[in-house]
Amino acid sequence: MPLRSFLFAPGNHPRRVEKALTLDADAVILDLEDAVAIAEKPATREAVVEAYGAARTGLLYVRVNAADTEFCHGDFNAIVHPGLDGVILPKVESTAAVQTIDWLLGNLERERGLAVGGIDLVPIIETAKGLRDIDAILCAGTRVKHCAFGAGDFTLDVNMRWSREESELAYARARVVTASRAAGIEAPLDTVWVDLQDEQGLEASTRLALGMGFQGKMCIHPNQIPVVNRVFTPTNAEIDFAERVVAAFAQAEKEGSAAIQLDGKFIDYPIVYRAQRTLDAMAAIRAKASK
């Protein structure tokens, strides 16, 4: 399943949740955290679980409240049921937090007859402390197979100005991507784009994330989905070139060569591996579209 676009929907707005589940996002995140007022959090859990049975086009995740809040345990106790594909865990700052949540999630799965480890767990790195300890967090021996970067809380935490160009986020983004790779997990998900009127800015931010090694981006409005999906989908030219690279190199290997030229470009194993990655990504996108 491709993970290009993750759309947030407030869990306490049933109509917005219903609509979100019909859109072309690869995953929808029903939110129990920032989008829900404190007084409404407990009641929203039931509404979120009711959405599990609705028809949907992609995966269904829930963003719970942070591990150090009074709401986190209740969130997990309420939401772990068949139909839940994954959990987004905000403001992760330590291995203890992610290990504890993984333990809790595993026990709830076991008690409720679900496959242990089957529910995805995505920690969001969005504080200076979380970024500092990201290597340990991602190597903590849990079910985590990809993380996310949250620039809103991160820039608040470090008193950073979040500019349109996002140059100030380069270090944090690079740390999240390289730490994910070093931990042997999948590429991470990039932060949201908050200016709903600036589609050009969204596209630039998405292309920057793609170039830095992210596999997808979180979204806060349905109108952002087509842009994000398009940027994270290989173009026809990229697919054509990748197919020709793989085919030409396979023929070269049969003839005892491990380096060739194609369209005036030098082709060796790293280029071939990147081409195959492009084809694998497109295969996943096509498989989703055919369902």
Image (tube, rainbow, N blue to C red):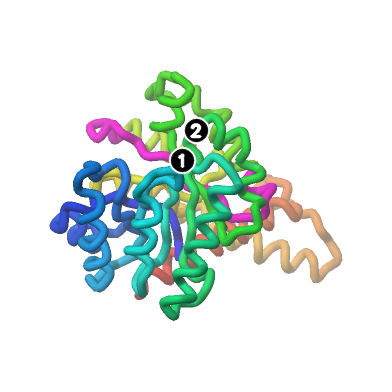
Mark 1: few, some, or many residues within 10 Å (few <14, many ≥20)? many
Q: Residue at x 20, y 48 (%)?
A: 40
Q: Which residue is mark 2?
A: 127
Q: Secondary structure at mark 2?
A: loop
| Image x and y of residue 52, in percent | 28, 69
Q: Residue furthest front?
A: 70
Tag count: 2
* Residue occupying the point 36% across, 74% down: 82
Residue 190 sits inside the magenta stretch: yes
The mark found on residue 227 in the picture is none
Task: Give the residue type at disc 2.
Answer: Thr
Local packing at callout 2 (Cα closer than 10 Å; few below 14, some 14-19, many 20+) is many
Magenta span includes 154: no
Tag 1: amino acid? Lys
Q: Assign the magenta stretch its main secondary structure.
A: loop
Viewport quadrant of the N terminus: bottom left
Callout 1: helix, strand or loop? Answer: loop
In the rendered image, residue 145, in percent from the top left (x then y), is placed at 56, 58
Q: Pick the residue in front: 243 or 183.
A: 183
Viewer can see residue 77:
yes
Q: Toward the viewer: 263 or 174? A: 174
> Residue at (39%, 51%) from the top-left corner?
72
Q: Is residue 95 left or right of residue 83?
A: right
Task: Say which residue label 1 marks.
Answer: 91
Q: Is residue 167 above or below residue 267?
A: above
Marks 1 and 2 in Cβ contact (< 8 Å): yes
- Residue 55 position within the rendered picture, expressed as x and y whole percent measured from the top left: 24, 71
In the displayed structure image, the side of residue 264 where residue 70 appears, left or right: left
Q: Which residues are magenta?
A: 179-199
